[in-house]
Amino acid sequence: MASSKEFLEYILEQLSELEEIAYRAMMGEYIIYYKGRIAGGIYDDRLLIKPVKSAIDYVSDIRYEVPYEGAKEMILIEEVDNKEYLTELFKAIYDDLPTPKKKK
């Protein structure tokens, strides 16, 4: 099942206080970038983020979900209606997110 554009727009609005939030459509889903690093994505209208240490420390009730068959588990973010929570979460995880690989 693909994610809706409406859910993507809602999440982008929730993250609107952050600079350099971007997304890329990928096979009906959306990859979310924060300052050029992949922070997570929207899969089946669920916000999932990379399970980096700072995210594990920040999220109080962790629930892991698989974004699609064969993928690694990610952390499901259920508090999508709390704009302040999402903003602070993304700020907290930034330093632990992998830097993009240089293209040859």
Image (cartoon, rainbow, N blue to C red):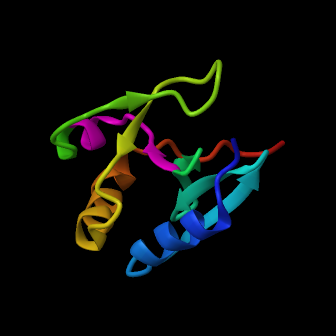
27 sits to left or right of 41? right
Specify the farthest residue to the bottom.
17
Q: Residue at x 53, y 23 (%)?
A: 72
Q: Quadrant of the C terminus?
A: top right
Residue 94 falls in image quadrant:
bottom left
Quadrant of the image containing the N terminus: top right
Is 34 contained in the magenta span?
Answer: no
Residue at point 56%, 58% (across, down): 33
53 relative position to 50: left or right: left
Query: In front here: 99 or 18?
Result: 18
Residue 89 against residue 17 in the figure, above or below: above
What x and y, as percent, mark residue 74? 44, 33
Residue 37 is situated, as x and y percent measured from the top left of the image, at 54, 53
Q: Which residues are magenta?
A: 46-56
Q: What residue is at 38 percent from the left and 34 percent from the top?
A: 51
Give residue 47's position: percent from left, percent from top.
Answer: 46, 50
Q: Residue at x 25, y 34 (%)?
A: 62
Question: Residue lying furthest right in this view?
Answer: 104
Residue 59 appears left or right of 102: left
Q: Quadrant of residue 96?
A: top left
**Residue 54, magenta (yes or no):** yes
- The residue lying furthest to the front in this view is 1
Horizontal and vertical percent position of residue 66: 52, 27
Q: Residue extending furthest top?
A: 70
